[in-house]
Amino acid sequence: MSYDHYRYLIEKTVDSCSFETLDQFCRDVVSRMLDHIQSDEMTSLKKREFTLVTNLISMVQQNPLPWDQAGAILDEISELEDQADIEDAIEGDLMEFLCAMDSWRDLQDNKVPIAAAAVSESLMNMLDAKVDPAKRSDEWLSVPPLRDEFARQVHFLKAAA
């Protein structure tokens, strides 16, 4: 299955889910993302960024997530990134995590299902970045970690619907 077909299917699947299901889905996906954030990514952060990201990671583990505080942290990280030199920019799995959090916040604020699809895409991007380039294919979901994660996400969404 190609990347475009994945996008089509995940967007179609989230479109038929309730807000509550999508919120639970985002929590599930983002929680799994935490396993991929490497300590070397964290140690490369400036002191303020490190503090903000550490606080945000802690908040993900709270239920319910304190969105007022998390949103303020996301906004401050965004401001810091806007001011940073390109070589100091947050990247990799940590950037995907922050993008997922911002998409999850968009779901909270605007109740748009497409935001949950963006959370899915962030984790899929994390996994894709770990695939040996020699094993990459136009059939994006033929790679076992991507295929397995996609199956897990679709199962979650359909079981909760």
Image (cartoon, rainbow, N blue to C red):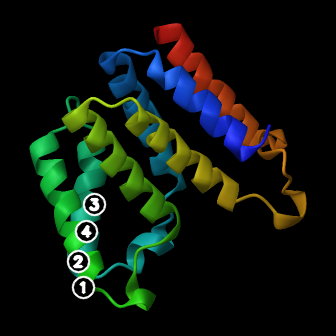
* Cα–Cα gap, marks 1 and 2: 5 Å
Tell me residue 91's x, y (percent): 47, 72
* Cα–Cα gap, marks 4 and 2: 5 Å
**Up-down relation of residue 35 to residue 26 (above or below):** below
Hey, which residue is sitting farthest right in the picture? Answer: 134
The amino acid beneath tag 1 is Gln
Dots 4 and 2: beta carbons under 8 Å?
yes
Of labels 4 and 3, the one closer to you: 4
Instruction: Identify which residue is drawn at 61% across, 38% down.
Output: 7
* Depth order, front residue of 108/130: 108
Q: Earlier in the sequence, mark 4 or mark 3?
A: 3
* Cα–Cα gap, marks 1 and 3: 20 Å
Instruction: Identify which residue is drawn at 62% across, 26% down.
Output: 152
Q: Secondary structure at mark 2?
A: helix
Left or right placement of residue 72 versus residue 96 in this view:
left
Tell me residue 23's x, y (percent): 33, 27
The amino acid beneath tag 2 is Leu
**Residue where numbered disc 3 is placed:** 54
* Cα–Cα gap, marks 4 and 3: 15 Å
**Residue where numbered disc 1 is placed:** 83
The quadrant in which the N terminus is found is top right
Tell me residue 102's x, y (percent): 31, 50
Q: Tag 4: Cα neighbours inside 10 Å, few (<14), some, or many (≥20)?
A: some
Q: Secondary structure at mark 3?
A: helix
Q: Secondary structure at mark 1?
A: helix
* Depth order, front residue of 72/138: 138
Q: Secondary structure at mark 4?
A: helix
Instruction: Identify which residue is drawn at 58% across, 30% down.
Output: 10
The amino acid beneath tag 3 is Thr
**Residue where numbered disc 4 is placed:** 78
**Residue where numbered disc 2 is placed:** 80
**Up-down relation of residue 47 to residue 151 (above or below):** below
